[in-house]
């Protein structure tokens, strides 16, 4: 009896193992399959960076098993497209976040997640670098990704052929333009057809020099300085002054056309952002960058704009994986890999020494040293209602360059438009 009972017990245990083992094996297989099947999407306005981001994300997948698909949008359409996606619950898991009011608005509406507790954010980024993506309630709605520099690209060969040096003042800059024009060379490649670029790249590039840099901007936002004061008028006048040095028919010349004019040596200078550096990698002529010069007697300042943050969708179906990627970007390893694959001209904001290998990019980055730095004038406070400061300034710049308004009229319209909603504090 004892032996029979023992046999029955062994048989029972064996039967249990037969039943349990497939379940265990199946569970492990399902778990592995679940990990391998996680696919995140990333929205961006950097449509030119597909190759770099795909390579960066491939490294991340190799290390973690999580696939992230880079799905950029045409830059001018990004804000509207992203909002439509988020409102229809079809938004990406991860996305580039505009700084200041534009990004905070999506956070306040519940679309962007609160990323304040992302590991490494507070430890590896200064308060100033976190500020563009910090809401009024102190919560972070994105991690800082990169910043860009506004400057003047110039053809060194053309300058050398005409005995020209990099201008140290705005007045010298206009003399350089005049000298080139009299020599039959188009001084500036910029046009107006796409509208956004003349405002962001040129007007907001020169503004820190005309209005007193960072502290000057704060004086306007606080109400201490009027938005149509003498310095603002001078800035609009500066844009009116450069119109005659732009290409013939500049009103119909778009952003890509402007880049092509400079790249082919048909224009000596081009006011643009550091993101364009790689576009001129194969340019035949020697070229470089110089900072927008300040008017004589004014302190030099430069636009070092907090361009992009990265955040996660508050409604993502993969919050753990999305957050893990953000945390990786907040490490030295993540920042180093990111810098390796992003195009030249996009500068890490992490508080670490990330070496910039490309000579042109390093030269441009060096322009910010020793200068007062500020973001684009309208971004922090003037874009949260209608008519936005961005639109008003854009309209003013185009109007003065076309000769449709005086600089004073443009400044007045800028101030009057903001007065409809903006309350200084």
Image (cartoon, grey):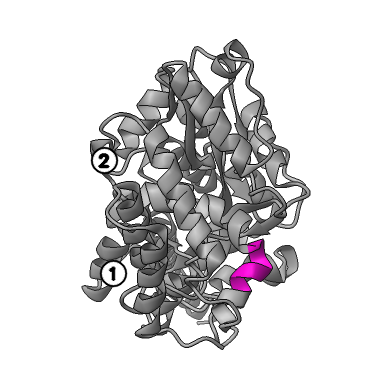
Q: Would residue 136 be found to the left or right of residue 247 on screen?
A: right
Q: Where is residue 267 in the image (x, y as percent from the top left)?
A: 43, 24
Q: Would residue 257 be found to the left or right of residue 133 on screen?
A: left
Q: Few, some or many C-alpha atoms within 10 Å of disc 2 (few <14, some 14-19, many ≥20)? A: some
Residue annotated with mark 2: 251
- Looking at marks 2 and 1 on the same chain, the residue that comes earlier in the sequence is marked by 1
Can you say whether 32 is above or below 259 in the image? below
Q: Where is residue 103 in the image (x, y as percent from the top left)?
A: 44, 71
Residue interval drawn in magenta: 212-218
Magenta stretch prevailing secondary structure = helix
Q: Residue at x 36, y 25 (%)?
A: 260
Q: Position of residue 204 (x, y in %)?
A: 50, 55
Does the segment drawn in magenta span residue 198?
Answer: no
Q: Residue at x 54, y 16 (%)?
A: 158
Q: What distance separates the C-alpha of mark 2 from that of mark 1?
A: 31 Å
Q: For the residues labelled 2 and 1, say whether their Cβ atoms are less than 8 Å apart.
A: no
Label drawn at residue 356: none
Q: Which of the pair 236/124 is nearer the observer?
A: 236
Residue annotated with mark 1: 83
């Amino acid at each position: 009896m004892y032996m029979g009972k023992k046999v029955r017990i062994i048989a029972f245990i064996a039967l249990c193992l037969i039943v349990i083992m497939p379940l265990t094996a199946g569970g492990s297989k399902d778990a592995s399959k679940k990990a391998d099947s996680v696919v995140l999407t990333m929205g961006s306005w950097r449509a030119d960076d597909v190759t770099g981001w795909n390579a960066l994300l491939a490294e991340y997948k190799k290390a973690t098993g999580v696939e992230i698909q880079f799905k950029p949008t045409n830059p001018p359409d990004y804000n509207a497209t992203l909002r439509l996606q988020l409102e229809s619950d079809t938004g990406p898991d991860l996305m580039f976040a505009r700084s200041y009011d534009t990004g905070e608005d999506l956070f306040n509406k519940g679309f962007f997640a609160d990323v304040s507790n992302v590991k490494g954010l507070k430890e590896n980024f200064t308060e100033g670098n976190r500020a563009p993506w910090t809401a009024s309630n102190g919560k972070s709605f994105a991690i800082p990704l990169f910043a860009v520099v506004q400057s003047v690209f110039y053809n060194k060969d053309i300058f050398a052929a005409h005995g020209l040096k990099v201008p140290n003042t705005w007045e010298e800059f206009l003399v350089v333009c005049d000298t080139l024009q009299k020599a039959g060379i188009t001084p500036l490649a910029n046009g107006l057809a796409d509208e956004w670029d003349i405002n962001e790249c040129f007007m907001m590039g020169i503004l820190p020099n005309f209005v007193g840099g960072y502290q000057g901007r704060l004086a306007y936002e606080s109400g201490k300085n009027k938005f149509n004061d003498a310095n603002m008028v001078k800035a609009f006048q500066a844009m009116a002054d450069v119109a005659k040095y732009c290409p013939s028919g500049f009103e119909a010349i778009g952003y890509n056309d402007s880049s092509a004019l400079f790249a082919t040596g048909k224009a000596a200078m081009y006011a643009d952002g550091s993101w364009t550096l790689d576009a001129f990698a194969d340019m035949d002529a020697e070229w470089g960058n110089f900072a927008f010069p300040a008017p004589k007697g004014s302190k030099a300042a430069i636009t070092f704009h907090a361009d992009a943050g990265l955040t996660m969708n508050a409604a993502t179906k993969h919050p753990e994986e999305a957050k893990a990627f953000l945390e990786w970007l907040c490490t030295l390893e993540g920042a180093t890999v990111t810098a390796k694959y992003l195009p030249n001209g996009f500068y890490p904001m992490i508080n670490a020494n990330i070496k910039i290998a490309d000579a042109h990019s390093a030269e441009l980055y060096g322009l910010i040293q020793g200068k007062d730095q500020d973001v684009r004038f309208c971004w922090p406070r003037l874009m949260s209602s209608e008519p936005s400061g961005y639109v008003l300034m854009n309209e003013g710049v185009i109007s003065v360059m076309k000769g449709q308004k005086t600089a004073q009229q443009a400044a007045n319209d800028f101030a009057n438009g903001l007065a409809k909603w903006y309350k200084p504090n």
